[in-house]
Image: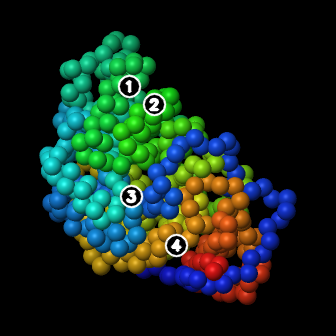
Amino acid sequence: MTMRMGSWLLGAALALGQPASAAPALPMTAGISAVEHPAWAAHATIYEVNIRQYTPQGTFRAFEAHLPRLRRMGIDVLWIMPINPISKDQRKGTLGSPYAVSDYHAVNPEFGNLDDFRHLVRAAHAQGFKVILDWVANHTGWDNVWVTQHPDWYLRNASGALEGYHYTDLSDHHQEVWADVIGLDYAKPAVRAGMIEAMRYWLEQADVDGFRCDVAWTMPVDFWDRVRTELSAVKPVFLLAEADTPEMQGHAFDMTYDWALYHLLIKVARGQADARDLARLYTDPQRRYPAGAYRMTFTSDHDENSWNGTDRELYGQGADAMAVLAATLPGMPLVYSGQEDALGRRLKFFDRDPITWGTFARAAFYRRLMALKHAHPALSNDLQPGNLVLIDTPNPHVFAFRRIKAADHVRVAVNLSASPVHVTLPGEPAFDLPGWGWSIKPKT
């Protein structure tokens, strides 16, 4: 994939224009998060690891060889997709979904064993990474050990039988049945206690640093509040919810998904939205999150790649420009396995489909973005009113903003079209941007 690069002006001086006095402080927040984030998280970046498809071997040990280059790229947190054994009953494809767990206390033998996973975590820690484990608390596979040990822990239909999990999508409310998994009944205290014990096991036995919690929004918030309290008694943890509901970030989760930004970036890249729509995302948000909360900003992940498309399919030639926005707007930027190599295909979800690594064509691009994140307090991950200032431009294809924290300022301008543009911003000389180009100017 050939991408036009933008302007990287690290350390350039910047004369700032003044925001309108009547404008509300952005990003707009509601309340204050009580979550105590781990100290290392403020400027952290995150990378999702698909162990099954990462190497020809598809193992923990094989993935370890990639740790040094990911660290050089500026990655801080490794989110590892589920490592538990996969149910065979009602399995989809040849290997099944990693999200159909058969035993919360065991390791998928495809990837190695518990000692291999411990070795990976130790190696990652030694190189400066934190490791969070993808955790599937909402449902299990049909032959999970709990089905036999605790049959009363599961949701059942009117006839008293187990059935596939009935899922209602949060964004468009469409309904579907996940036939390969069955739901747990969180109205029962024993289910909650059993799940927290299983999560604690991985903190104590493998020293992971937290969890990414699958479809967290389908489950009671008070359960997650208790998870936070009990796991934090073991060690400081980082919790990422697959959710975008603000109440998840009152007491439980460090971070939720910024799906609104993700879907809008796709529209922008396809010419279906422009800078005015991006501005409204911050001046008239559908939801307001607690001050101090983190949002995860992204252009792909395992679901989006497998089911919705590659970067080229979703963004065309605008993929890098959209990644710049995801990395510089408020939140923690995510990179998915293969994005740094311009992954050109949708990875299979239920079968082996190893990534064919090439020249790591976008690694230097991501390294510069992550270096900015690490170098500038203004690009911190937490939502704080006054940290974001939108800059008016006469061109709806130019989106410009500043991130501000104390004396640190970073100005970003992105061309949201394939045509070159001439840009005039308050307080600085005019400049030109190529199609899908950008300019990033920190103040020194």
Which of disc 2 and disc 1 is earlier in sequence?
1
Residue toward you, 78 or 5: 78
Secondary structure under tag 1 reads: helix
* Label 3 vs label 4, nearer the camera: 4
Q: Is residue 240 left or right of residue 124?
A: right
Vertical side of 430 occupied by 143: above or below: above
Which of disc 4 and disc 1 is earlier in sequence?
1
Q: Which residue is mark 2?
A: 226
Q: How many marks?
A: 4
Kindly check if marks 1 and 3 are in contact, taking CB atoms under 8 A apart as contact: no
- Amino acid at circle 4: Ala
Kindly check if marks 1 and 4 are in contact, taking CB atoms under 8 A apart as contact: no
- Amino acid at circle 2: Arg
Which of disc 4 and disc 3 is earlier in sequence?
3
- Dot 3 crowding, Cα within 10 Å, few <14, some 14–19, many 20+: many
- Amino acid at circle 1: Arg
Q: Which residue is mark 4?
A: 375
Q: Is residue 239 visible?
A: yes
Q: Residue at point 60% right, 50% down? A: 292
Q: Which residue is mark 3?
A: 77
Kindly check if marks 1 and 2 are in contact, taking CB atoms under 8 A apart as contact: yes
Percent position of residue 301, x then y: 40, 56
Secondary structure under tag 2 reads: helix
Report the coloring of the rendering: rainbow
Quadrant containing the C terminus in the rendered view: bottom right
Q: CA distance from mark 2 to mark 4?
A: 35 Å
Which of disc 3 and disc 2 is earlier in sequence?
3
Q: Which residue is mark 1?
A: 192
